[in-house]
Amino acid sequence: MKNVLMVMKLRDAEKEQLVQIPGYQFTFAENWNIPQEIIEQTEIVIGNPAKDVVAGFPNVKWLQLISAGADTYKDIDQEIMLTNAYDVFGEAISEYMLACAFSAAKFFPEYHDLQKERSWKRYGEPTLISGSKVLSVGMGSIGTEFLRKMDLLGAECYGVRRTVHDKPDFVKELYAFTDLEKILPECDTIALSLPETPETTKMFNEARLRMIKKDAVLINVGRGTAIDTEALLKVVNEGWFRAVYLDVTDPEPLPLNHPLWNTERIHITPHISGGSFSNIIRGTLLKVITNNLTLVSQGKPPVHIVDRKLGY
């Protein structure tokens, strides 16, 4: 029997589902205040501990994350197998991105503010998703699902990924990171769903931000570090962007006095696009965890092993 520590709020029925998997002894917790005896016995950790917490588990052999993002953990002990929850959040986050695109097209935040003033004036010219050019920078499950939805709405879709392969039928053209600037100036909506790697950090610097159409929409749901925050503030204050939607920021959490909070046309949510606490996402996440535990109990490798060099 392998000792598993799972740190996540679970219902009794969900715990019962997990303990039915043969070959494991489970300990369930809701925080990382774990008794030393359990720490020493644990061989498998399921959750998102801080890196220093991982280092405190002397016998852990496998860390199964409950997030898609894994870049924080790429430097943990190389002997620890690392898996993430890839494919769990594509539906939820792509719907969030879709909501951002519609909100920007119809000026919903601006009309919300005008309503507070009881103003009947028209804010600006609405746009259509249909016929617009949409670029997803990052073509994992999130970016791919976003483009699939936008294609169904009549948008012309383009994707950018680290290397060009596996182009979906609904994507007109795929570009490598090195060719980003070929397509960037053409697009009306640019959506980022990037992990944090040396290659992606500040990928959207001032020069690249200025390549984007002044009336384009920018959405970031991956990592805040993909955008140079100071450069973003500078170009937005000079009139760039119809709207900027940030579910992730750099720094994060965003300090109370940070200028991003009060900059016109920038709209912020506190890293909630994945809907991690919704019943639907919890169910999908538990299926991934159950499947991986079952595979390992059968002597097979789990799915979604993280490439430490890439960070995802």
Image (cartoon, helix red, strand yellow):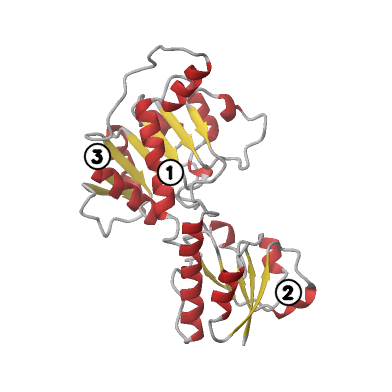
**Label 3, label 2: how far apart the Cα atoms are:** 51 Å
Give the spatial CA distance, label 1 vs label 2. 37 Å
Give the residue type that dot 2 points to.
Answer: Ile
Q: In the displayed structure, would residue 231 be above or below residue 137? A: above
Q: Position of residue 166 (x, y in %)?
A: 26, 60
Q: Is residue 40 left or right of residue 116?
A: right
Give the class, few, some or many, for how many residues have Cα within 10 Å of label 2's Cα (few <14, many ≥20): many
- Residue wearing tag 1: 96
The type of residue carrying mark 3 is Ala
Question: Which of the 4 quarters of the picture holds residue 300?
Answer: bottom left
Asked whether the viewer can see residue 241, the reply is: no
Name the amino acid, label 1.
Tyr
Q: Which mark is residue 39?
A: 2
Q: Residue at x 23, y 47 (%)?
A: 173
Question: Looking at the picture, how far across and down is residue 227, in whole percent?
Answer: 49, 39
Q: Nearer the viewer, mark 1 or mark 3?
A: 1
Element type at mark 1: helix
The residue singled out by tag 3 in the image is 155
Q: Is residue 275 left or right of residue 11?
A: left
5 on left or right of 219: right
Q: Which mark is residue 121?
A: none
